[in-house]
């Protein structure tokens, strides 16, 4: 049986935004610092060539260091800073420190201002920024030792001690600063990862709740509506319309899963959907004025199901009333209106736990960015206006 090796990809910078920003900044800055230091040091080194400086050694050394600075910058900017770049930088700087007696004129060595002193300081700072402390600190000590040995060999122990102290302070301060920054960045990335996880969980929970609400709406507007109608005595005996309504409810419930998982693309005829709603309510005296109208499938579903819920409420709560269904466009807005001449009600007195208007009408319209407006009053009938505005 063949074994398939699992492959993993490095984390995306989007997964670690703070760490990614740190990597970019602390790659670019060391690269530019090394390049500028290399070019400036080359000019300064060649400007003072008094004995015991050996020109035959100085020129090749400056050429190598300048070429290295350019190579370091190019490689760092293109491919990030690698362990090889850090090791090469440390080795060349330590070698330059040891060669101080032949590369730096005695008159420019004191005061920690020679080009080798600047090179050494740049190297120890870059090492702390670009490498883990367990490697960068020993590397900086190596550069410090090389400089101190070279300055001492050049008969200037005061300079050796002074700049060695400076290099050690630079190493310590930079190492502490970078450690603090890395710790803070780690916490920031951890907080971001927690936020992303919580956001994904919230989206999943919201999707689950919405799916439950859709299922509850569909049950409320099909099987439960039919059972409520029977329970209230709206059907007194055997009824072909009731049998057809029950069959339609079963078809609707059976088709819900497929309809939710693979919604049709493009647009559908909303007027056809509303005619199907009318056909499911043969027991309701109903007039319909349905202008041709094409909308996205999910919008057609929300408008048609909301209208069906409103008409089902007429059957349940206003027996004997007649109703009207209208579909029209008002500018860029699709409008579906359901009106009836029943006894009406006061919308403000509807208990909060009642599901019909809250979810079957208002909730459905909200899912597609639409709105529902209910106008009613005792003895004044009811008008439900559904609106959706979108691209047509």
Image (cartoon, helix red, strand yellow):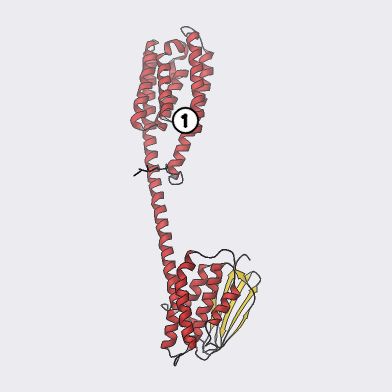
Residue, far right: 331
Please give left or right for residue 32 compared with residue 137 in the image.
right
Residue 258 lies, with reference to residue 36, above or below; the image says below
Position of 17 relative to 119 (above/below):
below
Quadrant of the image for the N terminus? top left
* Residue ranking furthest to the bottom: 236
Residue 199 at x, y = what percent? 42, 56
Q: How many labels does the image show?
A: 1
Of 138 and 222, nearer the camera is 222
Q: Residue at x 48, y 88 (%)?
A: 240
- Looking at the rendering, in which quadrant would you find the C terminus? bottom right
**293 vs 77, nearest the viewer:** 293
Query: In the displayed structure, would residue 355 be above or below residue 153?
Result: below
- Would residue 37 be visible to someone looking at this image? no
Q: Quick one: which residue is furthest to the front in this view?
A: 1
**Residue, disc 1:** 30
In the image, residue 375 sits, relative to residue 215, either above or below, namely below
Q: Position of residue 77 (x, y in %)?
A: 50, 32
State the residue in front, 134 or 234.
234
Identity of the residue drawn at 57% across and 77% down: 274
Residue at image coords 35%, 29%:
135
Using the rendered view, name the quadrant where residue 16 is placed: top left
Whether residue 336 is visible to the viewer of this picture, yes or no, is: yes
Of residue 225 and residue 50, the one placed in the foreground of this image is 225
Question: Tag 1's secondary structure?
Answer: helix
Residue 9 percent location from the top left of the image:
42, 42
Q: Residue 194: image x %, image y %?
A: 38, 52
| Disc 1 packing (10 Å; few <14; some 14–19; many ≥20) | many
Q: Is residue 20 left or right of residue 327?
A: left
């Amino acid at each position: 049986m063949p074994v398939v090796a699992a492959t993993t990809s490095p984390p995306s910078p989007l997964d670690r935004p703070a760490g990614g920003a740190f990597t970019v900044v602390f790659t670019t800055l060391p690269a530019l610092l090394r390049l500028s230091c290399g070019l400036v040091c080359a000019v300064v080194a060649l400007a003072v060539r008094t004995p015991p400086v050996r020109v035959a050694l100085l020129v090749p050394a400056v050429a190598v260091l300048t070429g290295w600075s350019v190579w370091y910058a190019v490689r760092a900017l293109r491919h990030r800073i690698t362990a090889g770049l850090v090791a090469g930088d440390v080795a060349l700087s330590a070698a330059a420190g040891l060669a101080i007696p032949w590369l730096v004129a005695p008159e420019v060595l004191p005061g920690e201002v020679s080009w080798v002193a600047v090179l050494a300081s740049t190297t120890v700072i870059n090492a702390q920024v670009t490498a883990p402390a367990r490697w960068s600190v020993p590397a900086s000590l190596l550069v410090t030792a090389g400089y101190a040995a070279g300055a001492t060999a050049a008969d200037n122990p005061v300079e050796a001690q002074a700049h060695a102290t400076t290099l050690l302070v630079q190493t310590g301060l930079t190492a502490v600063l970078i450690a603090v920054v890395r710790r803070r960045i780690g916490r920031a990335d951890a907080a971001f990862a927690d936020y992303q996880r919580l956001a994904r969980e919230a989206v999943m929970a919201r999707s689950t709740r919405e799916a439950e609400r859709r299922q509850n709406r569909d049950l409320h507007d099909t099987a439960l509506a039919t059972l409520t109608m029977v329970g209230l005595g709206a059907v007194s005996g055997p009824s072909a319309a009731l049998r057809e309504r029950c069959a339609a409810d079963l078809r609707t419930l059976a088709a819900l899963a497929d309809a939710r998982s693979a919604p049709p693309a493009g647009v559908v005829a909303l007027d056809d959907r509303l005619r199907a709603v009318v056909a499911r309510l043969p027991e309701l005296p109903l007039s319909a004025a349905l202008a041709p109208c094409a909308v996205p499938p999910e919008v057609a579903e929300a408008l048609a199901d909301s209208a069906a819920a409103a008409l089902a409420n007429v059957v349940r709560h206003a027996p004997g009333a007649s109703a009207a269904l209208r579909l029209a466009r008002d500018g860029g807005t699709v409008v579906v209106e359901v009106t009836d001449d029943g006894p009406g009600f006061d919308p403000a007195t509807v208990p909060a736990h009642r599901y019909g208007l809250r979810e079957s009408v208002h909730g459905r319209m909200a899912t597609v960015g639409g709105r529902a407006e209910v106008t009613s009053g005792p003895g004044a009938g009811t008008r439900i206006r559904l609106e959706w505005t979108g691209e047509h």
